[in-house]
Amino acid sequence: MLALLFGRAKERPDRVEKPIELTAEGVWNEISGRLREALNENTFSTWFGQVHATAITENEFVLTVPNDFTREWIDGHFLGLIGAALAEVAGERSVRLDVATQPQSTPVADSKPPAQAQIGFGMNSKYTFDSFVIGSSNRFAHAAALAVAEAPAQAYNPLFIYGGTGL
């Protein structure tokens, strides 16, 4: 079955057999080439585009993946294929997936102060209580909205106003 998935060099006349370098990168290059043949290009680049080989020992082959999600997905969906290709390339070894640790970056403080602080959280000045036209038909709505604005989550919470437009 593995020969069907990956194809053996002996069975493929278009592929010249060359010795595989038994370094982590050399083994991974061979395995990733076989995976690329077995999977479509989008699947391969999505799941294996940022995978790197870190170490190979007598018993273990270590791959580094970018995050936990990728590790879990590869472990659940592709670990069998990787293990089979690894067995063909470098003999039986277990495959370990490590998540890459990224150095903690310290945020750089802005050296210049903001030009002008925004007042009102970017609200349009036309839609404030100062410019609100109070009439006999909207006096109660204005008072309720003002009470909610002055004491959020206390009076009239939630506030729902329904009615026609205009004064």
Image: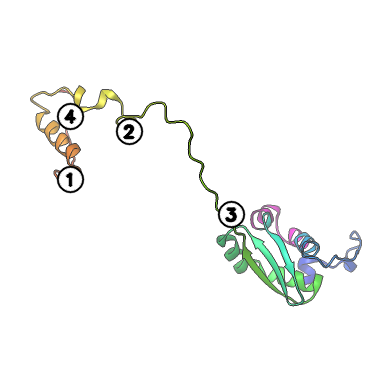
Pointer 2 local density, CA inside 10 Å: few below 14, some 14–19, many at least 20: few
Pointer 1 local density, CA inside 10 Å: few below 14, some 14–19, many at least 20: few
| Stretch in magenta | 34-47
Q: Is residue 68 left or right of residue 19?
A: left
- Label 3 near label 4: C-beta < 8 Å? no
Q: Secondary structure at mark 4?
A: loop
In the rendered structure, which disc, 1 or 3, sits on the residue that comes first in sequence? Answer: 3
Q: Nearer the viewer, mark 1 or mark 3?
A: 3
Give the label on residue 157, or none: 1
In the rendered structure, which disc, 1 or 4, sits on the residue that comes first in sequence? Answer: 1
Q: Amino acid at mark 4?
A: Gly
Give the label on residue 121, or none: 2
| Color scheme of the displayed model | rainbow
Q: What is the C-alpha distance between the residues marked 1 and 4?
A: 22 Å
Pointer 3 local density, CA inside 10 Å: few below 14, some 14–19, many at least 20: few
Q: Nearer the viewer, mark 1 or mark 4?
A: 1
Which sits in the foreground, 79 or 8?
79
Q: Secondary structure at mark 2?
A: loop
